[in-house]
Amino acid sequence: MIIILKRNPDQSKVDIFVEEFRQKGLDINYSKGETTTIIGLIGDTLSLDMDLLRANEIVEDVKRITEPFKFANRKFHAEDAQILVGEGAFGAGKFGVIAGPCSVESYEQIIEVAKRVKAAGAKFLRGGAFKPRTSPYAFQGLKAEGIEMLLEAKKVTGLPIVTELISINHLDLFDEVDVIQVGARNMQNFEMLRQLGKLNKPILLKRGNASSIEELLMSAEYILAGGNSNVILCERGIRTFETATRNTLDISAVPLIKRLSHLPIIVDPSHATGISALVKPLAKASVVSGADGLIIEVHPMPSQALCDGAQSVTPNEFDAIMADVKLLCQMENKAL
Protein backbone atom coordinates (compact mmCIF):
# COMPACT_ATOMS: atom_id res chain seq x y z
CA MET A 1 0.00 0.00 0.00
CA ILE A 2 1.17 3.54 -0.71
CA ILE A 3 -0.02 6.72 0.93
CA ILE A 4 0.49 9.95 -1.00
CA LEU A 5 0.75 12.97 1.29
CA LYS A 6 -0.47 16.46 0.59
CA ARG A 7 2.12 19.05 -0.41
CA ASN A 8 4.25 20.41 2.45
CA PRO A 9 2.58 18.48 5.30
CA ASP A 10 3.34 19.28 8.95
CA GLN A 11 6.39 17.09 9.68
CA SER A 12 5.40 16.44 13.29
CA LYS A 13 2.07 15.04 12.09
CA VAL A 14 3.87 12.94 9.51
CA ASP A 15 6.14 11.48 12.20
CA ILE A 16 3.16 10.55 14.38
CA PHE A 17 1.35 9.09 11.35
CA VAL A 18 4.34 6.93 10.38
CA GLU A 19 4.94 5.73 13.94
CA GLU A 20 1.38 4.38 14.10
CA PHE A 21 2.20 2.03 11.21
CA ARG A 22 5.45 0.92 12.79
CA GLN A 23 3.51 0.01 15.93
CA LYS A 24 1.37 -2.26 13.75
CA GLY A 25 4.51 -4.14 12.63
CA LEU A 26 4.65 -2.70 9.11
CA ASP A 27 7.86 -1.79 7.29
CA ILE A 28 7.98 1.80 6.12
CA ASN A 29 9.45 3.11 2.89
CA TYR A 30 9.50 6.91 3.09
CA SER A 31 10.19 8.74 -0.17
CA LYS A 32 10.25 12.53 -0.22
CA GLY A 33 10.59 14.19 -3.62
CA GLU A 34 10.54 17.83 -4.68
CA THR A 35 6.76 17.88 -5.10
CA THR A 36 5.49 14.55 -3.75
CA THR A 37 5.96 12.63 -0.52
CA ILE A 38 5.06 8.94 -0.52
CA ILE A 39 4.81 6.53 2.39
CA GLY A 40 5.10 2.91 1.32
CA LEU A 41 3.68 0.31 3.71
CA ILE A 42 5.10 -3.19 3.39
CA GLY A 43 3.55 -6.09 5.27
CA ASP A 44 -0.01 -7.20 6.06
CA THR A 45 -2.06 -4.12 5.16
CA LEU A 46 -5.38 -5.91 4.60
CA SER A 47 -6.76 -4.71 7.94
CA LEU A 48 -6.10 -1.03 7.13
CA ASP A 49 -9.18 1.03 6.24
CA MET A 50 -8.33 3.02 3.11
CA ASP A 51 -11.21 5.46 3.59
CA LEU A 52 -10.12 6.16 7.16
CA LEU A 53 -6.58 6.81 6.00
CA ARG A 54 -7.82 9.17 3.27
CA ALA A 55 -9.68 11.14 5.94
CA ASN A 56 -6.41 12.13 7.61
CA GLU A 57 -5.69 15.82 7.03
CA ILE A 58 -2.17 15.20 5.68
CA VAL A 59 -3.21 12.48 3.19
CA GLU A 60 -3.86 13.16 -0.50
CA ASP A 61 -4.60 9.58 -1.64
CA VAL A 62 -4.18 5.91 -0.76
CA LYS A 63 -3.55 3.06 -3.21
CA ARG A 64 -2.99 -0.67 -2.91
CA ILE A 65 -0.04 -2.22 -4.74
CA THR A 66 -0.82 -5.40 -6.63
CA GLU A 67 2.68 -6.12 -7.98
CA PRO A 68 4.73 -8.58 -5.87
CA PHE A 69 7.76 -6.26 -5.87
CA LYS A 70 7.39 -3.39 -3.41
CA PHE A 71 10.77 -1.77 -2.73
CA ALA A 72 11.60 -1.86 -6.46
CA ASN A 73 8.24 -0.36 -7.43
CA ARG A 74 8.06 3.12 -8.95
CA LYS A 75 4.78 3.65 -7.11
CA PHE A 76 6.86 3.79 -3.93
CA HIS A 77 9.46 6.08 -5.53
CA ALA A 78 8.06 8.60 -7.97
CA GLU A 79 11.50 9.98 -8.82
CA ASP A 80 14.35 8.10 -10.50
CA ALA A 81 17.04 6.74 -8.21
CA GLN A 82 20.62 7.80 -8.86
CA ILE A 83 23.57 5.57 -7.97
CA LEU A 84 26.81 7.52 -7.48
CA VAL A 85 30.18 5.78 -7.74
CA GLY A 86 33.35 7.84 -7.83
CA GLU A 87 33.00 10.48 -10.53
CA GLY A 88 30.34 8.50 -12.39
CA ALA A 89 26.65 7.86 -11.82
CA PHE A 90 23.66 5.96 -13.15
CA GLY A 91 20.10 7.27 -13.29
CA ALA A 92 18.22 10.55 -12.85
CA GLY A 93 19.81 12.13 -15.92
CA LYS A 94 23.25 10.58 -15.45
CA PHE A 95 24.58 8.08 -18.00
CA GLY A 96 27.35 5.74 -16.92
CA VAL A 97 29.59 3.69 -19.20
CA ILE A 98 31.39 0.60 -17.91
CA ALA A 99 34.06 -0.84 -20.19
CA GLY A 100 36.88 -3.35 -20.10
CA PRO A 101 37.80 -6.93 -20.95
CA CYS A 102 35.58 -9.92 -20.34
CA SER A 103 38.34 -11.36 -18.18
CA VAL A 104 41.49 -9.97 -16.62
CA GLU A 105 44.39 -11.77 -18.32
CA SER A 106 47.48 -9.85 -17.24
CA TYR A 107 48.60 -6.66 -15.53
CA GLU A 108 49.68 -5.14 -18.86
CA GLN A 109 46.37 -5.98 -20.52
CA ILE A 110 44.11 -4.47 -17.85
CA ILE A 111 46.22 -1.31 -17.49
CA GLU A 112 46.27 -0.74 -21.26
CA VAL A 113 42.51 -1.18 -21.56
CA ALA A 114 41.80 0.94 -18.48
CA LYS A 115 43.76 3.87 -19.86
CA ARG A 116 42.09 3.65 -23.27
CA VAL A 117 38.49 3.37 -22.04
CA LYS A 118 39.00 6.23 -19.62
CA ALA A 119 40.40 8.42 -22.40
CA ALA A 120 37.30 7.60 -24.49
CA GLY A 121 34.94 8.67 -21.71
CA ALA A 122 34.13 5.55 -19.70
CA LYS A 123 33.73 6.20 -15.97
CA PHE A 124 34.03 2.58 -14.81
CA LEU A 125 36.38 -0.33 -15.51
CA ARG A 126 34.98 -3.83 -15.85
CA GLY A 127 36.97 -7.04 -15.81
CA GLY A 128 36.19 -10.60 -14.84
CA ALA A 129 38.35 -12.12 -12.11
CA PHE A 130 36.06 -15.07 -11.44
CA LYS A 131 34.52 -16.42 -14.64
CA PRO A 132 31.51 -18.76 -14.61
CA ARG A 133 31.86 -20.77 -17.81
CA THR A 134 29.59 -23.32 -19.45
CA SER A 135 32.51 -25.68 -19.96
CA PRO A 136 34.61 -26.77 -16.95
CA TYR A 137 37.64 -26.82 -19.27
CA ALA A 138 37.36 -23.16 -20.30
CA PHE A 139 39.41 -20.36 -18.71
CA GLN A 140 37.91 -19.70 -15.25
CA GLY A 141 39.66 -16.40 -14.51
CA LEU A 142 42.63 -15.37 -12.37
CA LYS A 143 40.41 -15.15 -9.29
CA ALA A 144 42.00 -13.24 -6.35
CA GLU A 145 45.00 -12.27 -8.49
CA GLY A 146 42.62 -10.81 -11.04
CA ILE A 147 41.00 -8.60 -8.41
CA GLU A 148 44.45 -7.39 -7.35
CA MET A 149 45.19 -6.45 -10.97
CA LEU A 150 41.89 -4.56 -11.20
CA LEU A 151 42.76 -2.64 -8.04
CA GLU A 152 46.15 -1.75 -9.54
CA ALA A 153 44.39 -0.46 -12.66
CA LYS A 154 42.17 1.64 -10.41
CA LYS A 155 45.25 3.16 -8.75
CA VAL A 156 46.69 4.03 -12.14
CA THR A 157 43.53 5.47 -13.73
CA GLY A 158 41.21 6.32 -10.85
CA LEU A 159 38.39 4.32 -12.47
CA PRO A 160 36.04 2.50 -10.06
CA ILE A 161 36.03 -1.24 -10.77
CA VAL A 162 33.12 -3.55 -11.58
CA THR A 163 33.59 -7.30 -11.34
CA GLU A 164 31.43 -10.38 -10.94
CA LEU A 165 30.82 -12.33 -7.75
CA ILE A 166 30.03 -15.97 -8.49
CA SER A 167 29.94 -17.31 -4.92
CA ILE A 168 29.24 -15.76 -1.52
CA ASN A 169 32.30 -17.71 -0.33
CA HIS A 170 34.42 -15.14 -2.21
CA LEU A 171 32.69 -12.09 -0.74
CA ASP A 172 35.61 -11.16 1.54
CA LEU A 173 37.77 -10.64 -1.56
CA PHE A 174 35.36 -7.94 -2.80
CA ASP A 175 35.84 -5.44 0.04
CA GLU A 176 37.59 -2.93 -2.25
CA VAL A 177 35.49 -3.63 -5.34
CA ASP A 178 33.34 -0.59 -6.12
CA VAL A 179 30.43 -2.31 -7.87
CA ILE A 180 29.67 -6.00 -7.41
CA GLN A 181 28.19 -7.62 -10.49
CA VAL A 182 25.66 -10.46 -10.18
CA GLY A 183 25.74 -12.33 -13.46
CA ALA A 184 22.81 -13.79 -15.36
CA ARG A 185 23.45 -17.27 -13.94
CA ASN A 186 23.16 -15.97 -10.37
CA MET A 187 20.19 -13.64 -10.83
CA GLN A 188 18.07 -16.06 -8.80
CA ASN A 189 20.75 -17.12 -6.34
CA PHE A 190 18.58 -15.86 -3.52
CA GLU A 191 21.03 -16.64 -0.72
CA MET A 192 23.65 -14.51 -2.49
CA LEU A 193 21.14 -11.71 -3.04
CA ARG A 194 20.22 -11.72 0.66
CA GLN A 195 23.87 -11.35 1.61
CA LEU A 196 24.35 -8.49 -0.87
CA GLY A 197 21.32 -6.81 0.68
CA LYS A 198 23.34 -6.42 3.88
CA LEU A 199 26.05 -4.39 2.13
CA ASN A 200 26.19 -0.67 1.52
CA LYS A 201 27.67 -1.10 -1.95
CA PRO A 202 26.26 -0.80 -5.50
CA ILE A 203 25.11 -4.07 -7.02
CA LEU A 204 24.88 -4.52 -10.80
CA LEU A 205 22.13 -7.12 -11.27
CA LYS A 206 22.01 -8.77 -14.69
CA ARG A 207 18.82 -10.26 -16.08
CA GLY A 208 18.86 -14.04 -16.48
CA ASN A 209 18.79 -15.19 -20.08
CA ALA A 210 15.44 -16.94 -19.54
CA SER A 211 13.99 -14.60 -16.93
CA SER A 212 10.97 -12.33 -17.16
CA ILE A 213 11.06 -8.66 -16.25
CA GLU A 214 9.02 -9.38 -13.13
CA GLU A 215 11.54 -12.03 -12.08
CA LEU A 216 14.37 -9.52 -12.52
CA LEU A 217 12.57 -6.99 -10.34
CA MET A 218 11.81 -9.64 -7.73
CA SER A 219 15.52 -10.50 -7.60
CA ALA A 220 16.26 -6.81 -7.05
CA GLU A 221 13.64 -6.90 -4.30
CA TYR A 222 15.77 -9.38 -2.33
CA ILE A 223 18.65 -6.89 -2.25
CA LEU A 224 16.46 -3.88 -1.53
CA ALA A 225 14.51 -5.65 1.21
CA GLY A 226 17.82 -6.37 2.95
CA GLY A 227 18.48 -2.64 3.23
CA ASN A 228 20.78 -2.04 0.25
CA SER A 229 19.11 0.48 -2.06
CA ASN A 230 22.08 0.71 -4.45
CA VAL A 231 20.85 -1.58 -7.22
CA ILE A 232 21.56 -1.12 -10.93
CA LEU A 233 19.61 -3.37 -13.30
CA CYS A 234 21.12 -4.68 -16.53
CA GLU A 235 19.43 -5.95 -19.67
CA ARG A 236 21.88 -8.31 -21.36
CA GLY A 237 19.76 -10.24 -23.83
CA ILE A 238 17.44 -13.20 -23.39
CA ARG A 239 17.24 -16.65 -24.96
CA THR A 240 14.75 -16.93 -27.84
CA PHE A 241 14.30 -19.19 -30.85
CA GLU A 242 16.66 -16.95 -32.86
CA THR A 243 20.06 -18.53 -33.53
CA ALA A 244 21.72 -15.78 -35.59
CA THR A 245 22.87 -14.08 -32.39
CA ARG A 246 24.03 -15.41 -29.04
CA ASN A 247 20.99 -13.88 -27.31
CA THR A 248 18.22 -11.48 -28.31
CA LEU A 249 18.50 -7.97 -26.87
CA ASP A 250 15.14 -7.08 -25.33
CA ILE A 251 15.37 -3.34 -25.92
CA SER A 252 11.71 -2.95 -24.92
CA ALA A 253 12.71 -3.97 -21.39
CA VAL A 254 14.39 -0.60 -20.90
CA PRO A 255 11.36 1.73 -21.26
CA LEU A 256 9.11 -0.87 -19.64
CA ILE A 257 11.29 -1.16 -16.54
CA LYS A 258 11.52 2.63 -16.40
CA ARG A 259 7.71 2.62 -16.06
CA LEU A 260 7.66 -0.10 -13.42
CA SER A 261 10.66 0.83 -11.28
CA HIS A 262 12.71 3.80 -10.14
CA LEU A 263 15.94 1.79 -10.35
CA PRO A 264 18.49 2.69 -13.05
CA ILE A 265 18.82 0.20 -15.89
CA ILE A 266 21.81 -0.21 -18.21
CA VAL A 267 22.33 -2.36 -21.31
CA ASP A 268 25.02 -4.89 -22.19
CA PRO A 269 25.18 -4.96 -26.01
CA SER A 270 28.20 -7.28 -25.94
CA HIS A 271 26.54 -10.28 -24.30
CA ALA A 272 23.25 -9.48 -26.00
CA THR A 273 24.41 -10.74 -29.39
CA GLY A 274 27.94 -12.10 -29.04
CA ILE A 275 28.91 -10.22 -32.22
CA SER A 276 31.26 -7.25 -31.91
CA ALA A 277 29.98 -5.56 -35.09
CA LEU A 278 26.54 -5.23 -33.49
CA VAL A 279 27.76 -3.53 -30.31
CA LYS A 280 27.82 -0.02 -31.78
CA PRO A 281 24.27 0.07 -33.23
CA LEU A 282 22.83 -1.58 -30.12
CA ALA A 283 24.70 0.84 -27.85
CA LYS A 284 23.14 3.72 -29.77
CA ALA A 285 19.69 2.14 -29.58
CA SER A 286 20.13 1.73 -25.84
CA VAL A 287 20.72 5.45 -25.32
CA VAL A 288 17.58 6.51 -27.18
CA SER A 289 15.49 3.78 -25.52
CA GLY A 290 16.07 5.53 -22.19
CA ALA A 291 18.86 3.43 -20.69
CA ASP A 292 20.96 4.88 -17.87
CA GLY A 293 24.22 3.40 -19.07
CA LEU A 294 26.14 0.73 -20.96
CA ILE A 295 28.55 -2.07 -20.13
CA ILE A 296 30.81 -2.94 -23.06
CA GLU A 297 33.57 -5.50 -23.46
CA VAL A 298 36.85 -4.03 -24.76
CA HIS A 299 40.00 -6.05 -25.47
CA PRO A 300 43.26 -4.88 -27.10
CA MET A 301 43.36 -8.03 -29.29
CA PRO A 302 39.95 -9.74 -29.36
CA SER A 303 41.19 -12.57 -31.58
CA GLN A 304 43.56 -13.63 -28.78
CA ALA A 305 41.16 -13.10 -25.85
CA LEU A 306 40.87 -15.97 -23.40
CA CYS A 307 37.14 -15.33 -23.05
CA ASP A 308 34.41 -13.97 -25.36
CA GLY A 309 36.69 -12.45 -27.96
CA ALA A 310 33.98 -12.55 -30.63
CA GLN A 311 31.86 -10.00 -28.77
CA SER A 312 34.71 -7.72 -27.67
CA VAL A 313 35.50 -4.48 -29.47
CA THR A 314 38.99 -3.00 -29.84
CA PRO A 315 39.94 0.25 -28.08
CA ASN A 316 39.72 2.08 -31.43
CA GLU A 317 36.23 0.70 -32.03
CA PHE A 318 35.28 1.74 -28.52
CA ASP A 319 36.45 5.28 -29.29
CA ALA A 320 34.03 5.40 -32.24
CA ILE A 321 31.19 3.99 -30.13
CA MET A 322 31.73 6.59 -27.43
CA ALA A 323 31.76 9.42 -29.97
CA ASP A 324 28.25 8.46 -31.06
CA VAL A 325 27.08 7.78 -27.51
CA LYS A 326 28.20 11.25 -26.39
CA LEU A 327 26.24 12.91 -29.21
CA LEU A 328 23.11 10.90 -28.44
CA CYS A 329 23.39 11.64 -24.72
CA GLN A 330 23.46 15.35 -25.51
CA MET A 331 20.31 14.96 -27.60
CA GLU A 332 18.62 13.00 -24.78
CA ASN A 333 19.76 15.48 -22.10
CA LYS A 334 21.84 12.86 -20.32
CA ALA A 335 25.14 13.73 -18.66
CA LEU A 336 28.05 11.34 -19.12
Image: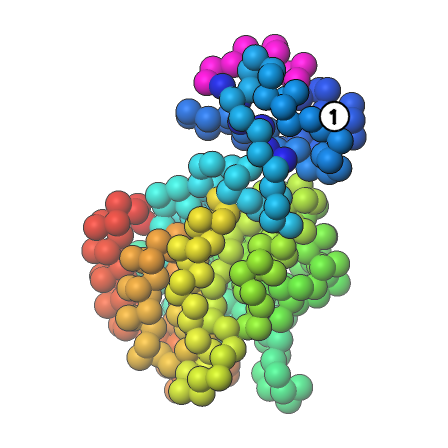
Residue highlighted by disc 1 = 22
Residue 13 falls within the magenta-colored stretch: yes
* Residue nearer the viewer, 236 or 143: 236
Give the residue at x 49% y 79%: 240
| Residue stretch in magenta | 7-17
* Magenta-drawn stretch, dominant element (helix, strand or loop): helix
Image quarter (top left, top right, bottom left or bottom right) of the N terminus: top right
Residue density around tag 1, few if under 14, some if 14–19, many if 20 or more, within 10 Å: few
Pinpoint residue 170: horizontal percent, then vertical percent.
71, 62
- Residue 137 occupies quadrant: bottom right
Give the residue at x 60% y 53%: 220
In the displayed structure, 303 sits above or below 185; it is below
Q: Which SS class for mark 1? A: helix
Give the residue at x 43% y 68%: 250
Pinpoint residue 136: horizontal percent, then vertical percent.
66, 86
What amino acid is at disc 1?
Arg
Residue 137 falls within the magenta-colored stretch: no
